[in-house]
Structures are given as C-alpha cells and as structure tokens.
Image (tube, grey):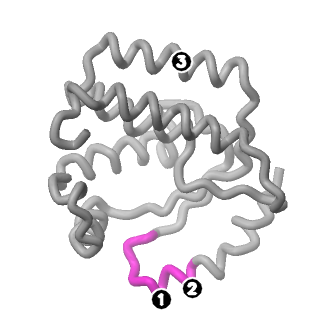
C-alpha cells in the first residue's frame, strides 16, 4: 500500500473498515474492550489522508465514505473513551526506525506529519470530524519508563471511563 497507494489504497482501507467494524461489534467476555484504532480513525485519518494527498481517486473516496456513513447511521458502534497518545511525527519516525519493519521503511516524515495534523484537527481542535467519545490526551514523546508512569497516573480514567 505504501509503495502504490493509488492501486492498493481502496483495497486496504475497505478491508480495514470491515475488520474495524468486526472488532467494534465482536463480543468479549471481559468487562471492557480496548482497540488500538477504530472505524472512526480509519476513515477520519487514514482514508482522509490518502484522499487529501491525491493518492486515492475521488470515486474510491466516495465509495468508502458512503459505506462509512451507512455503517455509522445504521449500526450502533459505542465508544466510551478515546485515548490519544499524542506523539510528534519525529518521535514516530524514530520509533519506526527502531522497530525496523520492512514494510515501514518507505514511510517518510511528511506522511507522519500529515497523519499527525489530521489527529490534532480531529481530537484536539475538534474542527474536522465529529468526535464520538470523550478524549483523554496523554503526551507520548517519552521513553518507556515515563510512559508506564503516565499510564499508571491515568489508569482509572482509561479502565473505568465515565459515561
């Protein structure tokens, strides 16, 4: 997808939308379900970025948007809390390099900057798309030790969200 987004963007994002919907709707035996991303971030961040950057044709964007709109109007997708690990694009790039995943080696800083701005507009400025739940912002440019400390400080907010 990163190497040929015009060809693979619609394929990947259609699959992501389907799997995110499945994750949202799947039953769990635990009292809480946590997801790394959601159907909302898939559409508002990743599909939007492909379209705005000219890497997704308008017709593909329109189809994904129609499906997303139908899903969110006709299926109850409850979200209690969004935890935004607010991280600079530079830190994200450093972490990508440390992970050393082959498929991520082609991701440029400009891509991470665009994704970051979409998240900021959506979750911080709340100027681009509806936010389906309260947002807890945790600054995440820190090392693992500091991040664990921040998690512990926010544990009750994350694990017992207020309605």
Q: CA distance from mark 2 to mark 3?
A: 40 Å
Question: Which of the two residues, 101 or 157, is positioned nearer the viewer here?
Answer: 101
Q: Is residue 153 left or right of residue 160?
A: left
Determine contact: label 1, label 2, CB under 8 Å: yes
Asked if 71 appears above or below 124 in the picture, the reply is above
Q: Position of residue 36 (x, y in %)?
A: 54, 56
> Which stretch is magenta?
140-150
Q: Is residue 150 left or right of residue 57?
A: right
Residue at the disc numbered 3 = 67
Residue at the disc numbered 2 = 149
Determine contact: label 3, label 1, CB under 8 Å: no
Marked residue nearer the N-terminal end (3 or 1): 3
Residue 133 lies in what quarter of the image? top right
* Label 3 CA crowd tier, 10 Å (few <14, some 14–19, many 20+): some
Asked if residue 35 lies in the magenta stretch, the reply is no
Residue 56 lies in what quarter of the image? top left
* Label 1 CA crowd tier, 10 Å (few <14, some 14–19, many 20+): few
Q: Position of residue 123 (x, y in %)?
A: 51, 46
Residue at the disc numbered 1 = 145
Question: Which of the two residues, 137 or 78, is positioned nearer the viewer here?
Answer: 78
Disc 2 is placed on an element classified as: helix
* Label 2 CA crowd tier, 10 Å (few <14, some 14–19, many 20+): few
Number of the front mark, 3 or 1: 3
Q: Position of residue 85 (x, y in %)?
A: 49, 63
Q: Quadrant of the N terminus?
A: top left
Q: Residue at x 27, y 44 (%)?
A: 114
């Amino acid at each position: 997808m990163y190497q040929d987004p015009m060809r693979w963007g619609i394929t990947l994002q259609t699959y992501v939308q389907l799997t995110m919907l499945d994750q949202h709707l799947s039953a769990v035996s635990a009292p809480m379900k946590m997801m790394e991303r959601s159907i909302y971030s898939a559409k508002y961040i990743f599909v939007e970025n492909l379209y705005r950057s000219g890497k997704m044709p308008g017709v593909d964007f329109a189809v994904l948007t129609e499906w997303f709109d139908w899903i969110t109007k006709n299926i109850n997708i409850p979200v209690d809390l969004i935890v935004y690990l607010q991280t600079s694009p530079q830190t994200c790039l450093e972490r990508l390099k440390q992970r050393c995943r082959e498929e991520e080696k082609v991701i440029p800083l400009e891509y991470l900057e665009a994704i970051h701005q979409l998240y900021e507009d959506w979750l911080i400025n709340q100027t681009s798309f509806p936010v389906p739940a309260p947002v807890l912002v945790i600054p995440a440019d820190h090392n693992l030790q500091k991040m664990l400390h921040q998690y512990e400080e926010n544990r009750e907010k994350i694990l017992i969200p207020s309605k």
